[in-house]
Image (cartoon, rainbow, N blue to C red):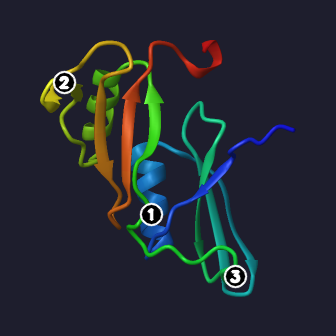
Amino acid sequence: MDLTLEVAQVPVTDVDRAKTFYAEAVGFRVDLDQEVAPGMRIVQLTPPGSRCSVVLMSGMPNHPEQPAMAPGSLHALQLCVTDIAAAHAALAERGVPVTPVQHVGARGWEDGPGEEWNSFLFFRDPDGNSWCVQEAPSPLSER
């Protein structure tokens, strides 16, 4: 049985503001923006090259087995790129508040790129949900 992670919900206070941030600043593709029932809206966005999307929702009732997440409570979602310096420059140019490129060293987090799989940058969306961007040695399709 395959279990594929295809969608992750990102809890936000303002769907339009979050949609603008993820689509225009971060560069995600808008796959869907639909009112699925009166007052219930779903916006699905996909990072370029990703097999997994994120969803922003408003007005949707919570299922008893899935309690609500407060806006800004989702942390450490991770994106991978093959050029961390280019990703840093592109995100910063589009107004995303990114950290410097960092790596894990002998004393914890240190500035600058590290060895293979050890270069990262971080950012938060307008609600405070946090993201990690990691440099991978090759595109996902080649791993």
Name the mark on residue 18: 1
Earlier sequence position, callout 3 versus callout 1: 1
What residue is disc 2 on?
Answer: 105
Callout in the foreground (3, 1): 3
Quadrant of the drawing holding the N terminus? top right
Residue at 37 percent of width and 19 percent of height:
83
Q: Nearer the viewer, mark 2 or mark 1?
A: 2
- Residue with the mark numbered 3: 64
Relative to 42, is 131 on the left or the right?
Answer: left
Which quadrant is home to the C terminus? top right
Amino acid type at image mark 2: Gly
What's the residue at 73%, 87% (across, down)?
38
Quarter location, residue 93: top left
Q: Position of residue 99 (x, y in %)?
A: 20, 41
Q: Residues within 10 Å of mark 1 (few under 14, many from 20)?
A: many
Of the image marks 2 and 1, the number of the one nearer the N terminus: 1
Q: 90 or 50: which is nearer to us?
A: 50
Q: Earlier in the sequence, mark 3 or mark 2?
A: 3
63 versus 142 height, above or below:
below
SS label for mark 2: strand
Residue 87 against residue 92 in the figure, above or below: above
